[in-house]
Amino acid sequence: MQKIDTEIYRQINNDVYKEQGDIWWKPDTVLHILKTSVNPWRVGYASKVLQRLNIDPKGKTALEVGCGGGILTEEIARMGFDTTGIDPAAESITTASNHAKAGGLNIRYEQGSGEHLSFPDNSFDVVFCCDVLEHVTDLPRVVSEISRVLKPGGIFIYDTINRTFVSKLVAIKIWQEWKRWAFMPPNLHVWKMFIKPGEMQEVLQASGLDWKEHTGSKPNVSIPKLLQYLRKRVKGVWNFVDLGKHFWLVEDNDKNILYAGHAVKKQAASRQVSYN
């Protein structure tokens, strides 16, 4: 998979993350759904990977690429990692910093992009990149940069959206376009920027990362029930708080929409592709 064509990238609305004010931590906002409905799945998966690899977060360094307002970053810090978050949106970094300080969490936040990470080689034990890779214009470069800042033997944990007919129906039509159920801003995701698992594996391999596995996700309720929940929110019977109390993702073999995975940086330095 190569750099996204400019015409396709222009379709995505990444400016939503630059809106003024707290769009992340206020309970009745769409991005807060990441905390209530997505984090239980992705944090659960990350914890399982770390346990399986016998990695004790205490004393280890972790970076989250594309940290937004810090909803996942704070979970990483609570695991015990010495944690850093980086994001291109200054507004999101301000929100993340203020929330971490208010909660007594010592997290370093920096403004910057995944294509140009401002850290030395071999800086981090673990790098997280979740709900981000399908938003970037140059996936190979982002993954190459992540590999560069990982220590040899370090772990890359990620999740993204598969490019399938099902993901077009659910993530584009139901989540964004069809007003009967839609709860996300238009063009928050662009289907052609979604990443097939095989494409992800190829990019990882090209950057010196040894891919280990992929796992999928599904709603905790049936699809008809979930559509009922989304309809209640659209009609004003429920708000995002109510939706988050009833709907969340659980791990599953289905990788048609949102899937997660991890890879390990190879101990012996292999030749990496240069994107300079």
Image (cartoon, grey):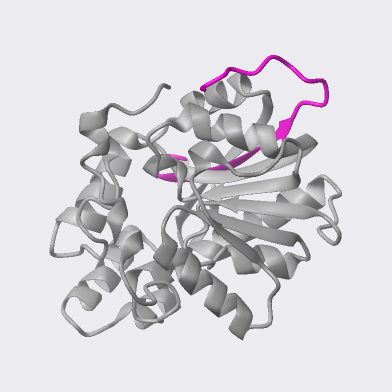
The residue positioned 33% from the left and 35% from the top of the image is 193
Q: Quadrant of residue 181?
A: bottom left
Q: Position of residue 276 (x, y in %)?
A: 52, 22
Asked if 131 appears above or below 154 in the picture, the reply is below
Q: Quadrant of residue 33?
A: bottom left
Foreground pick, 24 / 249: 24
Foreground pick, 218 / 242: 242
Whether the magenta-drawn stretch holds residue 275 is answered as: yes
The residue positioned 71% from the left and 70% from the top of the image is 78
Q: Is residue 90 left or right of residue 240?
A: right
> Which quadrant: the N terminus?
top left
The residue segment tinted magenta is: 255-276
Q: Position of residue 155 (x, y in %)?
A: 72, 41
The residue positioned 42% from the left and 72% from the top of the image is 24
The residue positioned 64% from the left and 67% from the top of the image is 75
Say whether residue 164 is visible: no
Q: Position of residue 66 (x, y in %)?
A: 50, 52
Asked if 263 appears above or below 179 in the picture, the reply is above
Whether the magenta-drawn stretch holds residue 74 is answered as: no
Q: Is residue 117 left or right of residue 242?
A: right
Say whether residue 56 is visible: yes
